[in-house]
């Protein structure tokens, strides 16, 4: 890395601290969740946030967008939502001067920097699939036209793990597009007391921008250039391959308890997330700790357990923990 890159890394670390401070004006606690979201943004990935109602998932995403000075769009996913409600639609218009008729495209809420897909599992797969192309390529195709949605572009989706009636589980292809699945937990007692004391109805207005879109893109490019040792790449690949029951290196408990393991995209995401974590921590190289810290959030939603695991109440997170302990 050049001297300029070293200075840039230090500035990103300082920006991380300031962003956490700004978000903390509105959101009490959830420090780890904020850090995971920042890792995802710097790594150029999308996040699926899972948590019970009332944990301020929506407010958190909105506040983070304000702290990054990014345009923000929200879609409330419902059973009757259509793909055109996300992407946009063409309307027939008549030119008042010439009398000629033609189609004009009206952009949907997907044309933004940060898109909150609220309760994404409440809409049918046909509508969920409208996000696939934009999440992978940053563009949408409408008729014969291909349009850029935004740069940078992040989908931060929320999901309620309690209510399952009237929901549509995300297909594996959709889940694989998310860099992280972040499981938000209840705040501790001190944080909950702070929430009860607060009157944070309009505090979002007090959040000051720390970075802008260009600075965030520069941070993403810096993460791409950051070196990583070969043994850490091999560690990430070994971890991912060990999650596949048909792989020759998979342990016996994976063969017994897993239907499908993580695909090759997971290896790339672990490496990118580890780089982003190192940059946000102000370091110029990736450590083994970075790989271990990001692996669970990358892998858990990509591992499909079978009924043997469900009968024993063994989750993908439990299996990833065992794999991490076995990896050297």
Image (cartoon, rainbow, N blue to C red):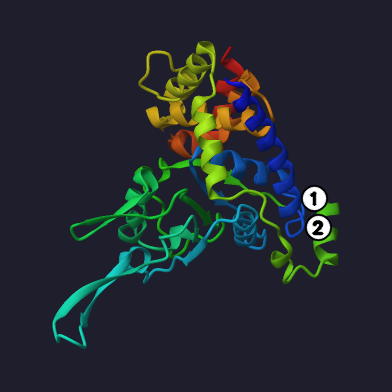
Q: Is residue 68 above or below residue 167?
A: above
* Picture quarter with the C terminus: top right
Q: Pointer 2: what residue?
A: 192
Q: Quadrant of residue 129?
A: bottom left
How would you rate the neighbour count of disc 1 (Cα within 10 Å): few for under 14, some for 14-19, many for 20 or more? Answer: few
At x 68% / y 36%, what residue is drawn?
Answer: 11
Kindly tell me whether residue 83 is visible in this rendering.
yes
Where residue 200 sits: x, y (%)? 76, 67
At x 36% / y 69%, what residue is drawn?
Answer: 85
Give the side of residue 14 with respect to residue 293, left or right: right
| SS type, badge 1 | loop
Where residue 170 sits: x, y (%)? 40, 51
At x 74% / y 66%, what residue is drawn?
Answer: 203
Q: Quadrant of residue 202?
A: bottom right
Q: Is residue 124 above or below residue 190?
A: below
Q: Pointer 1: what residue?
A: 188
* Of residues 304 and 28, the one drawn nearer to the viewer in this rendering: 28
* Of residues 161 and 125, the one drawn nearer to the viewer in this rendering: 125
Kindly tell me whether residue 311 is visible in this rendering.
no
At x 60% / y 45%, what residue is drawn?
Answer: 37
Marks 2 and 1: CB-CB under 8 Å? yes
Where residue 317 sits: x, y (%)? 57, 34
* Picture quarter with the N terminus: top right
* Of residues 204 and 147, the one drawn nearer to the viewer in this rendering: 147
């Amino acid at each position: 890395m050049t001297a300029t890159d070293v200075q840039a890394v230090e500035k990103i670390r300082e920006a991380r601290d300031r962003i956490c401070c700004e978000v903390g004006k509105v959101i009490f606690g959830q420090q780890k969740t904020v850090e995971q979201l920042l890792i995802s943004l710097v790594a150029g990935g999308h996040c699926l946030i899972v948590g019970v109602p009332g944990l301020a998932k929506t407010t958190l995403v909105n506040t983070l967008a304000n702290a990054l000075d990014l345009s923000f769009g929200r879609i409330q996913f419902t059973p009757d939502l259509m793909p055109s409600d996300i992407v946009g639609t063409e309307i027939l218009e008549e030119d008042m001067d010439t009398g000629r008729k033609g189609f004009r495209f009206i952009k949907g809420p997907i044309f933004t920097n940060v898109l909150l897909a609220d309760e994404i599992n409440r809409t049918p797969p046909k509508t969920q699939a409208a996000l696939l192309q934009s999440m992978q390529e940053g563009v949408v195709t409408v008729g014969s036209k291909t349009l850029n949605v935004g740069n940078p572009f992040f989908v931060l989706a929320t999901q309620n793990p309690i209510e399952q009636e009237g929901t549509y589980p995300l297909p594996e292809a959709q889940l694989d597009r998310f860099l992280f699945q972040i499981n938000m937990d209840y705040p501790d007692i001190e944080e909950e007391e702070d929430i009860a004391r607060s009157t944070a109805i309009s505090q979002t207005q007090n959040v000051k921008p720390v970075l802008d879109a260009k600075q965030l893109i520069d941070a993403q490019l810096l993460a791409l250039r950051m070196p990583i040792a070969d043994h850490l790449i091999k560690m990430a690949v070994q971890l991912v391959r060990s999650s596949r029951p048909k792989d020759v290196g998979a342990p016996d408990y994976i063969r017994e308890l897993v239907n499908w393991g993580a695909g090759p995209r997971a290896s790339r995401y672990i490496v990118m997330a580890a780089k982003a974590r190192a940059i946000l921590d102000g370091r110029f190289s990736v450590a083994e700790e970075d790989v271990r810290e990001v692996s669970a959030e990358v892998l858990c939603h990509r591992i499909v357990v079978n009924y043997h695991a469900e009968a024993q109440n063994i989750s993908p997170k439990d299996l990833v923990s065992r794999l991490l302990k076995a990896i050297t």
